[in-house]
Image (tube, grey):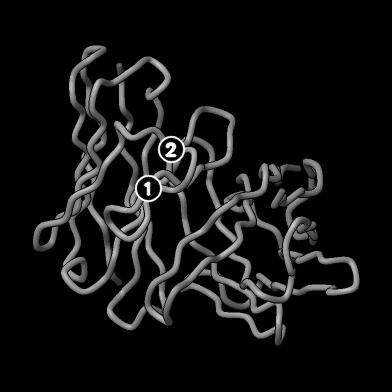
Amino acid sequence: QVQLVQSGSELKNPGASVKVSCKASGYTFTSYRMNWVRQAPGQGLEWMGWISTNTGNATYAQGFTGRFVFSLDTSVTTVYLQINSLKDEDTAVYYCARLLSTSSTESWSDPWGQGTLVTVSS
Amino acid sequence: SYELTQPPSVSVSPGQTARITCSGDALPRQYAYWYKQKPGQAPVLVMYKDTERPSGIPERLSGSSSGTTVTLIISGVQAEDEADYYCQSADSSGAQWVFGGGTKLTV
């Protein structure tokens, strides 16, 4: 079955970097883009952007440019989210989610990874 | 930036019908999608392209669309339906996604 398994929780100091992984299985990895979504404690879902698993090209949402980097390794069917220069407000659960689409303007996510909690605290 | 508006909360008794709305200016031109999230769990897709139900989702969940508002309808609400529900769509270009603020359904 289609499955996305993310790496475990992280505790980081402000200013450090973190790299979250998302391993896909059960489907052709390069056939679907991958989304990243953030959920701060007690808050709603926030779309961060996506990465093409075919080309490696990434699209970042407003507010997620500069310190956030999406990457992938097709040999291990894994996408990565790296956050640099961590701030307290980066504390959140980060989800990867496979992107399904039937056209350039119609897209949704299914399934989602289990989420990775990143805590930024000194 | 583009926004989707949902009511913060909806409360219904077991067996009643819950209606959760999502409003946005681009919804006449863009489909909406719905996700259900229980505490401590990842979101799950429950409706796509306004009215299409993924396999495994109960038939008592349905969707409707009218103008700038889409609605997730849950008939015969059960205790297991209690969760946060998020709508998702895109701007007119389809390049930028957006989520609604979420609606907490209390049964």
Q: Is residue A61 above or below residue A120?
A: below
Residue A19 in the image: state x and y as whole percent. Answer: 80, 60
Kindly report the distance in space between the C-alpha atoms of the residues bearing marks 1 and 2: 6 Å
Residue B64 in the image: state x and y as whole percent. Answer: 18, 50
Q: Which numbered marker is on residue B44?
A: none
- Chain letter for the residue marked with disc 2 in the picture: B
Q: Is residue B36 above or below residue B51?
A: above
What residue sits right under mark 1 in the picture? Answer: B53
Q: Toward the viewer: A30 or B95? A: A30
Residue placed furthest toward the right? A75
Residue B21 location, quadrant? top left
Left or right of A25 in this view: B28: left
Q: Are marks 1 and 2 in contact (CB under 8 Å)?
A: yes
Q: Toward the viewer: A67 or B94? A: B94
Residue B41 location, quadrant? top right
What residue sits right under mark 2 in the picture? Answer: B57
Q: Residues within 10 Å of mark 1 (few under 14, many from 20)?
A: some
Q: Residues within 10 Å of mark 2 (few under 14, many from 20)?
A: few
Tell me which residue sits at (35%, 70%) in the image.
B90
